[in-house]
Amino acid sequence: MANEGETAAQLVEIMTSLSAVMREETQRLEAGTRALELAELAEAKARLVGALEERLARLTRQEPDWTAALDEPTRQAFIEGLGELRAASMVNATLLERHIELSADLMGAISAEAKRVTGSRAYAYGASGTLARADLTTPISLNGQF
């Protein structure tokens, strides 16, 4: 039982750290921080998620009913850690989804405008003698990189 309590305390520590990283990432995204400046937070988030998944999987495999063996204070801390992690991840996921959608829309608009401006369209005759127009993909570079 002491081992499960110690392991649960480690899980709570990881969940608390992960929640803090997600909240900081959310704050920075709301403040308009550039994506490149968020790389360190994304790496930390990935490491913490990996550690949490690994420990939960190992613990569940070794002791399927480990949560039942927890004492009340440890169980309460674990439940609170899960609640905080859930709240932080929901806000973070919503904001990230919105940023990804906006980025995709922006890239689509840039691509459409580049096609319009460059006139990168091709016409081909079909077997029935019809003329079909194909919009070719226009390469787009940001800061000199495709």
Image (tube, rainbow, N blue to C red):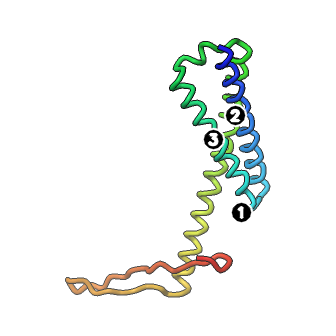
Q: Which mark is residue 49?
A: 3
Binning the other alpha carbons within 10 Å of mark 1 as few (below 14), some (14 to 19) or many (20 upward) gives few
In the picture provided, is 120 more to the left or to the right than 141? Answer: left
Q: CA distance from mark 3 to mark 1?
A: 20 Å
What's the residue type where badge 1 is placed?
Leu
**Amino acid on which the number 3 mark rests in the picture:** Val
Q: Locate the N terminus and report the quarter of the image it occupies.
A: top right
> Could you say which is closer to the camera, residue 59 or residue 102?
59
> How crowded is the residue under tag 3: few (<14 C-alpha within 10 Å), some, or many (20+)?
some
Task: Name the N-terminal-most of marks 3 and 1.
Answer: 1
* Residue type highlighted by circle 2: Met
Task: Identify which residue is drawn at 62% across, 60% down.
Answer: 102
From mark 1 to mark 2, how far is it between C-alphas? 25 Å
Q: Nearer the viewer, residue 132 or 82?
A: 82
- Residue drawn where x is 74% and y is 15% of the image: 73
Label 2, secondary structure: give it. Answer: helix
Dots 3 and 1: beta carbons under 8 Å? no
Q: Secondary structure at mark 3?
A: helix
Q: Are marks 3 and 2 in contact (CB under 8 Å)?
A: no
